[in-house]
Image (cartoon, rainbow, N blue to C red):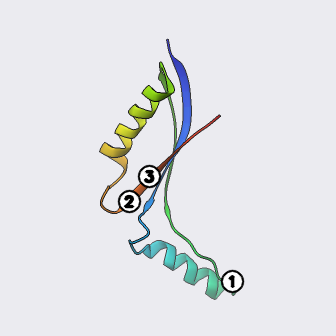
Amino acid sequence: MGTEYKGHIIIKLKDSIKDVRGLTLEESIKSSFNESFKFRTGEFYEFSLIAETKEEAKKKVNKIIEELLRNPITEVSELVWEK
C-alpha cells in the first residue's frame, strides 16, 4: 500500500546566472516604495506521492526534477519534505 509523502520543490537560477526578473522587481520596489530589497525569483511546486519508503519517494521526486523541472546548466533545486 505505501505511505503518502508530501513536500515542496524549489527551482531557482544559479547564483552565477543573472536573474532579470528579480532585478526588475528590485528596481520597481526601489522606485515605488523607496526601499531596497534583494530578490531571486524561481518556481515552487507542491507534491504528494505514495511510496513504500521515504528513500523511494525521494528517488522518484529527484527523477522528476532532473528529467522535467530543472535545467542543470542554469538552475538549482531544493527538495523540502513536509513533516
Q: Quadrant of residue 13?
A: bottom left
Instruction: Please report the residue visible at 38 percent of the width from the left and 71 percent of the height from the top.
Output: 17
Given residues 55 and 25, the one toward you in this image is 55
For marks 3 and 1 on the same chain, the one whose residue lies earlier in the sequence: 1
Q: Which residue is mark 3?
A: 77
Q: Amino acid at mark 1?
A: Glu
- Left or right placement of residue 73 versus residue 55 in this view: left
List the single residue furthest toward the top. 1
Residue 66 lies, with reference to residue 58, above or below; the image says below
Q: Is residue 73 left or right of residue 34?
A: left
Write the residue at 62% across / 37% down: 82
Element carrying mark 2: strand
Quadrant of res 62: top left
Spot occupied by residue 27 in the image (x, y as percentages of width and height) = 56, 84
Q: Determine whether the residue tagged by mark 3 lies in a helix, strand or loop.
A: strand
3 and 1 marks in contact (CB < 8 Å): no
Packing grade of label 3 (10 A; few <14, some 14-19, many >=20) is: many
Amino acid type at mark 2 = Glu
Q: Mark 2 sits on what residue? A: 75
| 1 vs 2, front mark | 2
Query: Amino acid under label 3?
Result: Ser
**Label number found at residue 35:** 1
Residue drawn at (47%, 72%), measured in percent from left and top? 21
Q: Are marks 2 and 3 in contact (CB under 8 Å)?
A: yes
User: How far across and how far down the image is residue 20, in percent?
Assistant: 43, 75
> Mark 1 or mark 2, which has the lower sequence index?
1
Which callout, 3 or 1, points to the residue nearer the camera? Answer: 3
Residue 30's place in the image compared with 18, above or below, is below
For mark 2, does the 10 Å Cα neighbourhood hold few (<14), some (14 to 19), or many (20 or more) residues? some
**Secondary structure category for the residue under label 1:** loop
Relative to residue 33, is residue 76 depicted above or below?
Answer: above
